[in-house]
Amino acid sequence: MTPPYQEADATGLPEEDRGLLKRWVAEGGPRAIRAAVVLLAAQGLRNAEIARRLDVSRQTVGHWRQRFDASGMAGLRERPRPGRPAIIDEAEVITRTVLAPDGGGASREVARELGYSHTAVAAIRRRWRVTPGNATVPVVPTRPPLPEAEVWVLGLYLDTHRALLLVGTRPAAHERRRGGSPGADVIAAVDAAVEAAVKVPPSPAPDPARGQGMLAGYLGEARRRHPGASLHAITLWDTGKGGPPPERRAGVVHHALPARTTWRTFLRAVVGLDCTRHPESSHRVYLDLAAALRAYADRTGADRERPPVRWLREPIATHFAGASRAGGDQRRESWGGANQIDLGSFNECVVIEAVRLAGTITRGEISHRTGLTQQSVSRICRSLLRRGILVEDDRRQATSGKPRTPVRLRGDAGHALGIHVDPEVLTAVVVDLDGTIVRSRTEPVAQTASPDQLVDHVARLGRGVLDAAGGAVRPGGFLGIGVATPGPVDVASGTVLDPPLLSVWRDVPLLYMLKDRFRCPIVMEKDSSAAAVGERWIGRDRRARDFVYLYLGTGVGAGLFLNGDIHRGVSANAGEFGQLCAVALERVGADGRPEILPECNPPVSVPGTAARLGMALGPRAAHDPRAAHRVVSAAAGAGDPVAGKAVRHVAGAIGRGALSLVDLLDIDLIVLGGPFFTDGVADLYTDEISRIVNDFPTARRLRRVDVERSVLSREAAAVGAASTIFHATFTPRLAGRPAPTRR
């Protein structure tokens, strides 16, 4: 007679799983029961009926159904280990905890998956202080233990004789549950790269003094790059043939692995902890580490010539900004630590926002707009008036009762410095709360300068503008510095990654380097996002709705202002506009990547198109794109048909990308601005883009899309950068990006 479980079948399972389960049933053995349980459950049978058919207990049926629901086929392949294992790898428990989708789950769930006792799992999690949701600061029990503080992976030294993991610690700031983590993918990439690196054949043992010197040099470089961190080197493995470790005079404490881990699972656990607690830059950082390990494994040549892996993370300005940078400019200005505007409540921000949008407004109107009681509004306004943030305007005669006295934001109550880093020019402006440019200065960029020289140039320019502003800035009214750079950027670490047309800025930790030159709050944004923030702040009630800011600079970017705040995206790089235009125009290369559209670089594409159409630009314009753009812009403004046709061609490509944004986001306002949105071409851009975004959208019958000029000047990105300081200080938000940190 055919056993009942061999009759099991199911149509609700994937074909691949169903086929494997049926094969296990046919093979018999311990997996046959597990497979039959799942197949019968997929038919909708209850546990009691499955237990009767298979002649097993209901507990057995429930156990295998739970394992399949939790882990899929892997849960059936792994036979649970009864009792407490002789050896438990603690790092394996930690990795499973921190990478769980729900933030760790219960100890029983981790124990069930790993086959460990749940009491042992709970004890390990208590010892490492790793809890569901990652709500506490972990303790890494190396020998000696790491300090009870935030742990960041800062480097890895690896050769064929030893490997050291370098971590940095600092006292934990205010703790909060972090967002989603790329940890699982990152760990897999690092794991595969380490696997390739450790397979490299051992090289002849180096001279001990030489090996010690190489490692000491690496640790010294780490000390210089991360001066504000407490550095700890954890030995993952050491054959003893690479020479003794350097003495502690390098400022690095040495540790051994925890007693109950392997080096491989420990590396996974520490990377997982770093990813889940600091997800902002983890993906890029660990993919860089994986690339360094793969390059080491793939390198050819004599073994004795193979240099070790000497990977170091770039400085993290947001977190290790407490010490001076070695070799940097040690001058300290009076523009430091001056943020005296300390808003005491969310309601104060709400009142300021209402006043800012209205320009001038009475207390009764504030109460009506915000929903706050008149008593609360009066109390908040008295406080803001006393502190000089608001000022009373001329009285208005009311239709009945006593005259009402409106209030307005006091423009000189606060100032900020905005700096825009462009591939060709640096712009610095001092702006007050009303958006008035108090002082500005623009200087060309030296294309051959090193990153240190460029950052020194930025610092000198910023100091010069601040000094020129002088008495216009009230004591205690300087709020900080906003920096706008081309994308892509890593906002979390303040690193400029790979800006187009400015290769010298690749992977430059700009924010860290600037924080070593200024003692004040500093924030960093993409230039298009900064321009959108400035448009929102300066535009007041005209921009009190969702909009997209198209920034026409050396490249075209989009700043997205949605739901009352700038939309930055997961990596703060939302608004990369060029590929959107390429896809809309079906301009895709042979490799499937969207082309880099020349139309999305106006200073080059506008004069280039005009020249192809037969317009003579003059000898100077042939070598100076900005001069060529000025020639075509002036001609277009004067009505030259060739120049006008060139501008409309470029505007048409940009309009196709804007059309995609209109359909995707369902917005009704597009703002155009930037240094190459000049008077001569402004109407041509506005008319052409307006035609496209109103004639072709799917929902064109339901809305009219306004295409308007920016309220900002040509210094839009610099003014916007300064406005990011105002936005972070005054805009009411219950959650989101914190205000700039202070040094």
Image: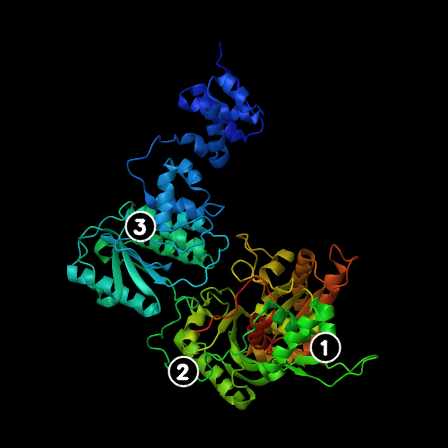
Residue 594, picture quadrant: bottom right
Residue 328 on image: x %, y %: 36, 78
Which is nearer the eye, 301 or 367? Answer: 367
Q: Is residue 311 left or right of residue 488?
A: left
Which is nearer the eye, 464 or 253? Answer: 253
Q: Residue at x 77, y 60 (%)?
A: 703
Q: Is residue 633 left or right of residue 320?
A: right
Callout 2: SS: loop
- Per the model, the C-alpha gap separating discs 3 and 1 is 67 Å
Q: Quadrant of the C terminus?
A: bottom left
Disc nearer the start of the sequence (2/1):
2
Q: Which residue is mark 1?
A: 361
Q: Residue at x 50, y 15 (%)?
A: 4
Residue 694 on image: x %, y %: 75, 62
Q: Is residue 100 above or below residue 570?
A: above
Q: Is residue 434 above or below residue 252?
A: below
